[in-house]
Amino acid sequence: MPARRARSLQPTRARHTRAAPSPRAPQVSARIVVDVLRAVEEHRLPPGTKLTEETLAEVFGTTRARVRIALQHLALKHIVTLHPNRGAFVAEPSVADARAVFAARRLIEPPLAASLVGRLGAAQLMRLRRHVNAEVLARDALDRHAGIKLSGEFHVMLAELAGNPVVTDLLRGLVARSSLIVAIYKRPNTVDCGPDEHRELVDALAGGPRRQIERLMDHHLRHVEAGLALTPPRSQGVDLRNVFAPAADV
């Protein structure tokens, strides 16, 4: 009788034996999210670009299922819009969306910057100054992609220094959405979010009163928003293989 009971338990154990999931799967999906966000921030992926699962799977060397997970995550961040039976597209924010995003940033960033007064050490201030110097070099070299990337990173860096990962993640998404908005609505011959105002902010962080820093950040964000027009151009076709060529070896 005990022997028969032991034999009857063997199939049950076998049914619970499963292959361990590949640790690479979530890493690849996360890398796709990061690279798409970066391409949006650097204006290499214009609003309205179709993100074909098959093509992304090819350039990232992964499966369509993993690409789909990444696209769903980007949709939650409002960077991608998913259309049933049509696929995924880089979001095309409306005028109302644009105003809402910058209003949200004005609610978050001025008090965030003010909260750093008296909390930053010499090494942290030096890190911010080196970053602003890199922005200046990118501007002088007429490297617009690098300038856009560094500019967005400056704002995210302030959130990181504040030490709140929830706010950092929220602001990273808002910065990416701002890049989409600027790509659509930027007025011709206007200056992008530039290093001069960033340097002024860093100087104020080194010893200025909280109210001054709040005013500077609010003015800075309003300056960027003032450079937007309200007539969006139509997006043009983009070859995803060219956009993500450096990431093809993932």
Image (tube, rainbow, N blue to C red):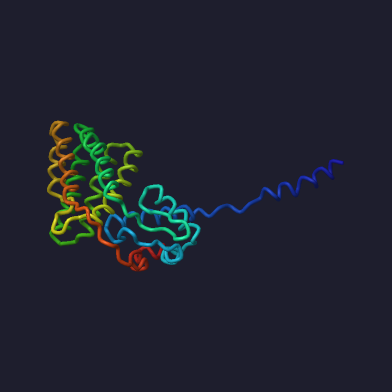
- The residue lying at 32 percent from left, 36 percent from top is 164
Q: In this rendering, would 63 be left or right of 218? A: right
Q: Which quadrant of the structure image shows residue 99?
A: top left
- From what the image shows, is residue 29 above or below residue 120? below
Q: Position of residue 196 (x, y in %)?
A: 12, 48
- Of all residues, the one furthest to the right in this rendering is 1
Vertical placement of residue 85 versus 114, above or below? below
Residue 102 lies, in percent from the top left, at: 24, 44
Which residue occupies 17% across, 46% down?
Answer: 129
* Image label count: 0
- In the rendered structure, the answer to whether residue 95 lies left or right of residue 7 reads left
Percent across and percent down for residue 138 are 17, 58
Query: Is the N terminus in the top left, top right, bottom left or bottom right quadrant?
Result: top right
Position of the C terminus, as image quadrant, is bottom left
Q: Nearer the viewer, residue 42 or 225?
A: 225
Nearer the observer, 98 or 27? 98
In the foreground, 130 or 230: 230
Residue 139 image offset from top left, x and y in percent: 15, 57
